[in-house]
Image: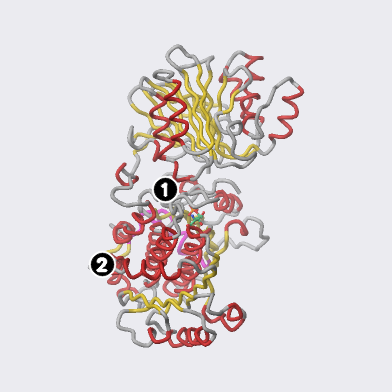
């Protein structure tokens, strides 16, 4: 997903924008660029395929001096492959207008055809370049940049977070948002526009979240917001960002992914801080208090999410059904949007998203906008689109997750789902007290799992060259098997499948031989014997097995080639500990193969396009 940073103020915007782009590198990109206006209002443009460092080298070589205005971009190619010409910022023909854009202009082809007929000369294959020429077309008519920018915005369809800069008005940036995230840091006599707060954090915590259909004129320390739907000015107070810079820093870790895996104990604590109290036997979720009455009438929950968040939702299905006694259906957001399913008003929609900006999940929420149903969210990024679209929700409080592969977010999401299930549990549920006690004990148990890192690393070394992997589990461990397979896939590029262990005889067993190992999640729960028999089926076909089982369980190791032991816990809280094992295993396989675990090929941290 692309990254945008813009600066207007009295410091050198080039330094700030380039540093901001580096803070956004975790999102994944293939080219980068920056446009700046020097103190005389002269424009300079630097673009490069590859890393932000390459753009920095070009700029230093040219040494344009301090730039009070600058806009920069990291591009994840959609229309047109990675190239200098396709890199942003894009400009009009006389380079008096520069534009950076995150999203998609769906009607760019027809606009481009019309603009070419009007004499525009295009140099790239991108949809974004259309915006530069469209603004230029209207500016030539009105000589008002605000009017030209507004007119151009009203012509385009699709999704955008866009920032324009012009030599016609060097003391301003012009920003607008529709469906793609945008936040503006408001400092003393300066402003920084960005796709997400990590590019702003080191300068200010005072931010304005730009909403859909809003255009903002950004000046040094001042923002003027216009609601484009109603053509009226909007007054909005700044908010304070709720995480600090060191959370977004790598610290002594080699990769963000490892750092974020090691944050698991803290993540568990933060997700339940001020919410779970084993002494008073209560689970207090402030974010749901405003909808208590509606919740009491909910007789079904549909969970919508993507990727890892979807698998967290599957754990939530078991939790909510067993503890709260509410029927749950978990659907991939990308499928939910296009399904024609009957939807009763007593059904609640629960969206789970780390970034809060995933296009498919946003689309799912938009689909039920007029259904009159309760829309809930479990989100990590405070103030994000999904957090704002839902009627109520529970934040994960996991802090920024920089690695593309989601780790601590999964832990946090399952923790929140556990607390929601307990919060909705009927009085006196047998699991209520034991789970409250177990939640208090979980951070220490997570620490114990992390202490197995060297064992897991050695196993990863042993299995890193296999080309296929199966992950199996039953009940609560089944979604963890699915998530474990996703983790291995996305950071090590090994084909991996998660399967319900009970399904082995219905097909997957045919794949098993000495070249197709299996990760068996075989905790000491009620179905252990059945999982052991699945393991026996696999070993009878020479399949190798890595078992994850409970400390002290003797019955498993004899049926596995390798065993990883985790502390005893409830079946309902075991996914948290098993997930840490999966995450470490995937991390060590990928690093043993020399891959970039924080930025896996072809992937982006938050998929803000369908
Ligand atoms: C998880 O490791 C992936 N990076 C991806 O599947 C992610 O979980 C998915 O894109 C959903 O993102 P969200 O939680 O921000 O909505």
- Residue ID for mark 1: 381
Q: Is mark 1 within 8 Å of ligand 1?
A: yes
Indicate the colouring scheme.
secondary structure
Q: Which badge, 2 or 1, is on the more N-terminal residue?
A: 1
In the figure, is residue 581 to the left or right of 44? left
* Along the viewing direction, whichever of 105 and 558 lies nearer the viewer: 558
The residue lying at 37 percent from left, 71 percent from top is 573
Residue range highlighted in magenta: 284-300
Q: Quadrant of residue 240?
A: top left
Are circles 2 and 1 on residues that touch, CB within 8 Å?
A: no
Q: Position of residue 448 (x, y in %)?
A: 27, 69
Q: Quadrant of residue 66?
A: top left
- Residue ID for mark 2: 444
In the figure, is residue 58 to the left or right of 280? right
Check disc 1: other Cα within 10 Å, few if <14, some if 14-19, many if 20+: many
Q: Position of residue 453 (x, y in %)?
A: 32, 66
Q: CA distance from mark 2 to mark 1?
A: 26 Å
Does residue 92 sit above or below 293 in this rendering? above
**Res 424 seen here:** no
* Along the viewing direction, whichever of 54 and 354 lies nearer the viewer: 54
């Amino acid at each position: 997903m692309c990254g945008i940073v813009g600066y207007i103020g009295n410091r050198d915007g080039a330094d700030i924008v380039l540093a901001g782009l580096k803070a956004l590198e975790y999102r994944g990109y293939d080219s980068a660029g920056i446009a700046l206006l020097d103190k005389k209002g002269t424009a300079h443009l630097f673009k490069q395929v590859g890393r932000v460092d390459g753009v920095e080298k070009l700029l230093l070589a040219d040494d344009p001096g301090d730039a009070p205005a600058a806009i920069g971009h990291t591009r994840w190619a959609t229309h047109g492959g990675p190239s200098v010409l396709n890199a942003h910022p894009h400009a009009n023909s006389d380079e008096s207008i520069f534009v950076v854009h995150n999203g998609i202009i769906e009607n760019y082809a027809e606009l481009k055809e019309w603009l070419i007929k009007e004499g525009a000369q295009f140099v790239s294959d991108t949809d974004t370049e259309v915006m530069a020429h469209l603004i230029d077309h209207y500016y030539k008519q009105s000589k008002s940049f605000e009017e030209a920018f507004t007119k151009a915005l009203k012509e385009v369809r699709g999704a955008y977070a866009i920032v324009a800069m012009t030599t016609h008005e060097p003391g301003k940036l012009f920003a607008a948002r529709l469906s793609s995230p945008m936040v503006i840091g408001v400092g003393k006599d300066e402003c920084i526009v960005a796709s997400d707060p990590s590019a702003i954090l080191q300068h200010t915590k005072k931010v304005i979240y730009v909403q859909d259909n809003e255009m903002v004129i950004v000046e040094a320390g001042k923002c003027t917001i216009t609601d484009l739907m109603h053509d009226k000015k909007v007054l909005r107070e700044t908010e304070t960002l709720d995480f600090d810079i060191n959370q977004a820093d790598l610290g002594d870790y080699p990769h963000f992914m490892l750092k974020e895996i090691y944050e698991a104990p803290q993540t568990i604590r933060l997700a339940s801080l001020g919410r779970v109290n084993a002494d008073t036997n209560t689970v207090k979720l402030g974010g749901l208090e405003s909808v208590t009455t509606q919740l009491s009438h909910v007789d079904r929950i549909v969970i919508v999410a993507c990727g890892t968040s979807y698998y967290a939702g599957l754990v939530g299905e078991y939790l909510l059904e067993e503890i709260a006694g509410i029927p749950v259906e978990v659907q991939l957001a990308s499928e939910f949007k296009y399904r024609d399913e009957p939807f009763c008003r007593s059904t609640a929609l629960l969206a789970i998203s780390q970034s809060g900006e995933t296009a498919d999940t946003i689309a799912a929420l938009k689909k039920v906008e007029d259904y009159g149903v309760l829309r809930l969210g479990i989100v990590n990024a405070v103030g994000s689109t999904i957090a704002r679209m839902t009627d109520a929700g529970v934040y994960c409080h996991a802090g920024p997750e920089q690695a593309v592969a989601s780790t601590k977010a999964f832990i946090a999401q399952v923790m929140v789902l556990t607390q929601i299930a307990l919060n909705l549990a009927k009085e006196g549920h047998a699991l209520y007290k034991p789970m409250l006690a177990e939640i208090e004990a979980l951070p220490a148990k997570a620490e114990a799992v992390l202490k197995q890192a060297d064992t897991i690393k050695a196993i990863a070394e042993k299995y890193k060259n296999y080309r296929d992997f199966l992950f199996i589990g039953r009940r609560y461990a089944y979604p963890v098997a699915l998530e474990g397979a996703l983790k291995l896939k996305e950071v090590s590029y090994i084909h991996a499948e998660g399967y319900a262990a009970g399904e082995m005889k219905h097909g997957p067993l045919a794949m098993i031989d000495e070249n197709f190992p299996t990760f068996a999640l075989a905790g000491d729960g009620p179905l252990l014997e059945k999982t052991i028999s699945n393991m026996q089926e696999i070993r009878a076909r020479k399949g190798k097995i890595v078992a994850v089982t409970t400390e002290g369980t003797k019955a498993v190791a004899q049926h596995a080639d390798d065993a990883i032991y985790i502390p005893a816990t409830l079946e309902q809280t075991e996914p948290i500990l098993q997930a840490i094992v999966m995450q470490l295993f995937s991390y060590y396989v990928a690093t043993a193969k020399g891959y970039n675990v924080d930025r896996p090929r072809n992937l982006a941290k938050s998929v803000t396009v369908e």
